[in-house]
Image (cartoon, grey):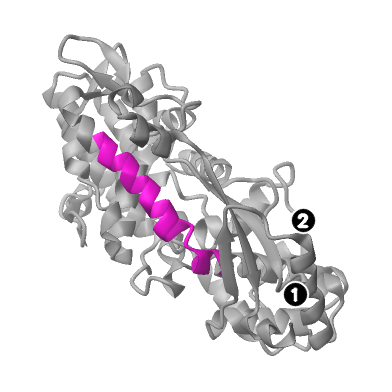
Amino acid sequence: MAKYNKFKSARSGGQVFNDPIYGFIRIPNDLIYDLIDDPYFQRLRRISQMGLSYLVFPGAHHTRFHHALGCMYLMQTTIQALRFKQIEITEDEETGLLCAILLHDIGHGPFSHTMEHSIVEGVNHEHISLLFMEKLNKRFNGSLTTAIQIFKKEHPKTFLNQLVSSQLDIDRLDYLKRDSFYTGVAEGNINAERLITMLNVVDDKLVVEEKGIYSVEKFLMARRFMYWQVYLHKTSLAAEQLLIRIFTRAKELTKSGLELQCSEPLRFFLKNSIGKAEFNTEVLESFALLDDVDIISALKYWRNHSDFVLSELCAIIIDRKLPKVTISDHPKPIDEIDKILNGFAKANNLSKEEAAYFVFEGQISNRAYDLDEQRINISKKQGDIIDVTDTLDKMNLEALSKAVVKYYFCYPKSQLKTN
């Protein structure tokens, strides 16, 4: 790793964050201090961790900034636990792990996953995170080279890559515990410290010691519960779908020649269709100026716009007049959808295409443990390495590894009057 040339030991050595989950989180070195202090990272203070979930869970106002710091703390704890078990992690690798986990979500846009494929097309936050990391690596004299290698899963020590991205990684340990705390949904509260204590490395692969089996099972169950009860909650799902449709309508109006009042960074993405090929340095800098504030501000402007679709959609979010949502195991019959869609269109003098912004369907799926991904391995006392699914009873295995698909249907509550 290239030498880091900024010296702020007097500042970084005494800097701590008081986190409601873990208590005091200490900044370990000067590089981490300056990364946190960088405008790219500070932007995460204005990026909601859970999108519009606060419309359902009033406490869920925490940000990606909270999550990133929590992940860094858990990584520090993990490094200490593994070193205690005589697992070699060099100083360079330690810094790489801390930087990689600190910056793993730096590419999230406004409201995190909600608008991930709306602001830009076909570009996920991991790709944008990598672009930010590469830019920061130049700014910090190559000090993030190892972190980038780990983030891209290209480090020769496999277990380092797994700590940052796997089915039992530091990211998941923090967001389950943190989101459970801020939403008040106790079912998601995992014992992250216990899981970390049970981690070990065998043949360069991350494993969980046998006595940690039930902690892993609880972790997987908590993830399943959190998706159904929180992340895929029908009301927040509807709100997030409406936000996506607001941006779609705004782009449609902008392309027709209308000038919508909004911030300059948001206007840039309204006027330009950006895919992976177009996501250059200029786009990255515009993206770095975009956060939740731009979106909320735009919604407040647009709710008074002359376009019925745009103004009504914005009012629904701002005033929390959210639509009716039904979820079932089967798609709603097309004739029933058409009846509601046509009724709403007629009542509001809209075309069927315009009414579809308010009346829509879709599907969601949930799988806590993916058998096609890199497995969570359990280290038996006898030395055998087995998949965690081999330790679960048949009922739990089916519940955790099977992808459950459900279908949602959204329509305005006022639509009931037009049937």
- Residue at x 70%, y 62% (from the top left corner): 269
* Residue 360 drawn at (x, y percent): 70, 66
Which residue lies at the image location 68% right of the left edge and 60% below the top edge? 332
Q: CA distance from mark 2 to mark 1?
A: 32 Å
What mark, if any, has residue 57 been given in the picture? none
Kindly identify which residue carries mark 1. 340
Q: Out of 192 and 413, give the one closest to the viewer.
A: 413
Q: Residue furthest left?
A: 84
Mark closer to the chain start, 2 or 1: 2
Q: Secondary structure at mark 2?
A: loop
> Which image quadrant is residue 356 in?
bottom right
What residue would you read off at disc 2?
Answer: 273
Q: Is residue 245 above or below residue 301?
A: above
Q: Amino acid at mark 1?
A: Ile
Does the rendering let one see residue 6? no
Is 409 drawn above or below residue 200 in the view shown? below
Looking at the image, is 4 positioned above or below residue 339? above
Horizontally, residue 368 falls left or right of residue 298, namely left
Q: Magenta includes 329?
A: no
The x, y position of residue 34, in whole percent, is 34, 50
Q: Quadrant of the N terminus?
A: top left
In the image, residue 280 lies at what x, y percent? Answer: 68, 46
Residues under numbered marks 2 and 1 in contact, where contact means CB atoms less than 8 Å apart: no
Q: Which residues are magenta?
A: 216-238
Label the magenta part by its dominant secondary structure. Answer: helix
- Which amino acid lies under the numbered mark 2 shown in the image of this protein? Ser
Q: Nearer the viewer, residue 407 or 305?
A: 407
